[in-house]
Image (cartoon, helix red, strand yellow):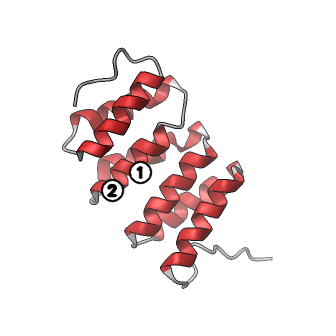
Amino acid sequence: VQVVNPITVDMSQEIREQSALGLGALKDTKAIHLLMSSFIDEDNVVVQRAIINALGSIGDISCLPFLSYIITTARDQSLVYECSRALSKYKDDRIIQPLLEIMKGPYIYSAKAVASEALKNVGWPEGIGY
């Protein structure tokens, strides 16, 4: 039996976006690989943001390397913002390094603001100025 990936099937942007968000709402770690591979194949930034959101909703720390990769390679600032939001859902010290990358990098204010709050939530003293 072949599984059809609803995110990468030639469907409308809205269907792909809602499919990604639906997978995130399930909070099932089995969806992580599917979401990551869909992100790589996806050209639409709206759908990519939904995929990042879904990875954050699942909340599994195994997503951290992939989210870090997106931060360092994203051509669209809104993807970095979504990575900040996704990482802010983790309560794990391992998110400190990618959040510091956002804080020190040439990213939009809103991404830095979310990253600063997330740093405070994991005990980083006073977040970091932005």
Q: Is residue 129 left or right of residue 18?
A: left
The quarter in which the N terminus is drawn is: bottom right
Quarter containing the C terminus: top left
User: For the residues marked 1 and 2, what is the alpha-carbon distance in whole angstroms?
Assistant: 6 Å
Counting from the top left corner in percent of width and height, residue 107 is at: 23, 45
Q: Residue at x 40, y 42 (%)?
A: 84
Residue neighbourhood size for the residue with mark 2, other residues' Cα within 10 Å, grouped as few (<14), some (14–19), many (≥20): some
Label 1 sits on residue:
82
Vertical position of residue 30 compared to residue 125: above or below: below
Label 1 residue SS: helix
Amino acid type, label 2? Ser
Query: For the residue marked with disc 1, what is the amino acid?
Result: Glu
Expressed as whole percent of the image width and height from the top left, the position of residue 40 reads 45, 64
Q: What residue is shown at x 23% (from left), y 25% (from top)? A: 129
In percent of width and height, residue 66 lies at 47, 47
Residue 52 or 129: which is nearer the viewer? 129
Viewer-closest of 127 and 51? 127
> How many residues crowd around disc 1 within 10 Å: few (fewer than 14), some, or many (20 or more)?
many
Residue that carries the numbered disc 2 in the rendered image: 78
- Label 1–label 2 contact, CB within 8 A: yes
Disc 2, SS = helix
The residue most toward the top is 125
Above or below — where is 10 with respect to 60? below
